[in-house]
Image: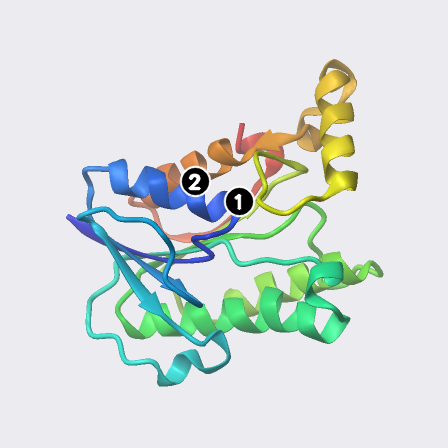
Amino acid sequence: MKTALVAGASGLIGSSLVRMLLAEEQYSSVHILVRKEIDWFDPKLIQHVADFDHLDSISLDFHVDDAFCTLGTTIAKAGSQAAFIRVDHEYVLSFAKKALSLGAGGFFVVSSMGADSSSRIFYNKVKGQMEADLKTTGYPKIAIFRPSLLLGMRTEKRAGEKFAGWMMTAFDFAIPAKYKAIHVDQVAKKMIEVAKQGNKGVFTLESDQLQ
């Protein structure tokens, strides 16, 4: 039996991922790091209130097998480029290091289509730098998931994404596989599927490989 640790459990992909992990017989417990406790009760679910700005100082005393990271924001929601970097780069790396210190052998992270540390596009550049820095952490296994536009029920309103999702769904037949919109449940399902595989190394899965 394995233990999972999740960061980003209240988000769109994260909530789907936790739900699926709780249903997996291979995982005896699912620990989540949250800013404040969420209204979610399950015998296998353990919540830990954590300050992501100071993860190195939080005391955790359990062993982790697999760490799943679905942390992510937008520049508009973060409020500035610096705040965006803090969430999508610094928090991800801090979480990875914390999970590694607890024994995690696998790290499974959601990035973004187009992630590239040399990109001129700020969003893609930050995601690419996050991926590059993760590869230096020393994990035996790292899997990076780069979904296209995500489909699912968000708690906050994003009119632009809603319209884009409708357009991509309507014209799905004409869109190349790599760029097709993908449902959050499919991303979560693939993350668990890859985590259950016994191979080691660094793996990057583009959106069409998550279908």
136 lies above or below 196: below
Indicate which disc residue 174 carries.
Answer: none
Report the label total: 2
Residue 3, position as x, y percentages in the image: 23, 55
The residue drawn where x is 45% and y is 39% is 188
Residue that badge 1 annotates: 12
Amino acid of disc 2: Ser
Asked whether residue 190 is in view, the answer is yes
* Residue at far right of view: 120
Asked whether residue 191 is in view, the answer is no
Q: Residues within 10 Å of mark 2 (few under 14, many from 20)?
A: some
Of 105 and 164, nearer the camera is 164
The residue drawn where x is 42% and y is 78% is 55
Q: Residues within 10 Å of mark 1 (few under 14, many from 20)?
A: many
Compared across the picture, whether 135 is left or right of 55 comes to: right
Q: Quadrant of residue 205?
A: top right
The residue drawn where x is 66% and y is 60% is 128
Residue 101, position as x, y percentages in the image: 31, 75
143 lies above or below 176: below
Regarding mark 1 in the picture, which secondary structure is present there? helix
Query: Residues at badges 1 and 2 in contact (C-beta under 8 Å)?
Result: yes
Residue that badge 2 annotates: 16
Residue 154, position as x, y percentages in the image: 59, 41
* Residue at far top of view: 173
The residue drawn where x is 50% and y is 44% is 13
Q: If the image is split into quadrants, where does the C terminus sit?
A: top right
The alpha-carbon separation of the residues under discs 1 and 2 comes to: 7 Å
Amino acid of disc 1: Leu
* Residue at far bottom of view: 57
